[in-house]
Image (cartoon, rainbow, N blue to C red):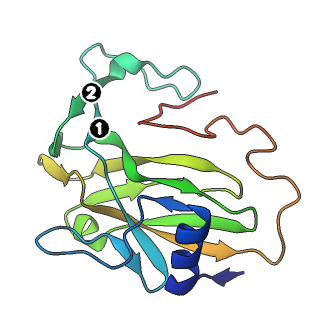
Amino acid sequence: MSIMSDKWIREQAIKNAMIEPFVETQRREGTISYGLSSYGYDARVSDEFKIFTNVDSAVVDPKDFSPKSFVDRKTDVCVIPPNSFVLARTVEYFRIPRDILVICLGKSTYARCGIIVNVTPLEPGWEGHVTLEFSNTTPLPARIYANEGACQFLFLKGNEPCETSYAERGGKYMGQKGVTLPKL
């Protein structure tokens, strides 16, 4: 497995619409950086947030997740309550080639503030907005800034195209738009 370079990412983004909208260079003027890096792509978080709340004393159940556990906000700055989390999505829409697996790492700016970004791998053949989970591990409220860098995606090329892609097996999160809650 090889990690793919900025040249390959740029070619795929432009020729095959792998990332839309695509930012060709790192942008950081007064913001948390985003755009193409040497061996990855730093995606932005959109302004759509689902803030976890437990006002109804619900039980978190991945097989039956209640949308009532969230408060929806459209905002430029989202405040995550202490020891809680929010769901959001990337500004960018991704289309993953069938011989590529994408993994995600959080931005160091957030990690150094106790904010962890979690994303499962983007599988070969998957497409959509990526749902992001931001965990505030601190005892204080924490801010997330919309339309700024949130995480870095690394593109790993397999030794050959997969036999069955995510799209072909009818993956439940295929083509997702907006912030997507757990599905069974």
- Dividing the image into 4 quarters, which one contains the C terminus? top right
Q: Is disc 2 placed on a helix, strand or loop?
A: strand
Q: Nearer the viewer, residue 29 or 89?
A: 29
Q: Amino acid type of disc 1?
A: Glu
Crowd rating for badge 1 (residues with CA inside 10 Å; few <14, some 14–19, many 20+): many
Q: Nearer the viewer, residue 127 or 151?
A: 127
Locate residue 90 relative to residue 3 in the image: left or right: left
Whether tag 1 and tag 2 are in contact, CB under 8 A, the answer is yes
Name the residue: 54% across, 19% down: 64
Q: Is disc 1 placed on a helix, strand or loop?
A: strand
Crowd rating for badge 2 (residues with CA inside 10 Å; few <14, some 14–19, many 20+): some
Looking at the picture, how far across and down is residue 166, in whole percent? 74, 48
Q: Quick check: 36 above or below 170?
A: below
Instruction: Identify the residue under disc 1.
Output: 48
Residue 5 seen in this snapshot = no
Name the residue: 64% across, 74% down: 156
Q: Amino acid type of disc 2?
A: Asp
Name the residue: 41% across, 36% down: 179
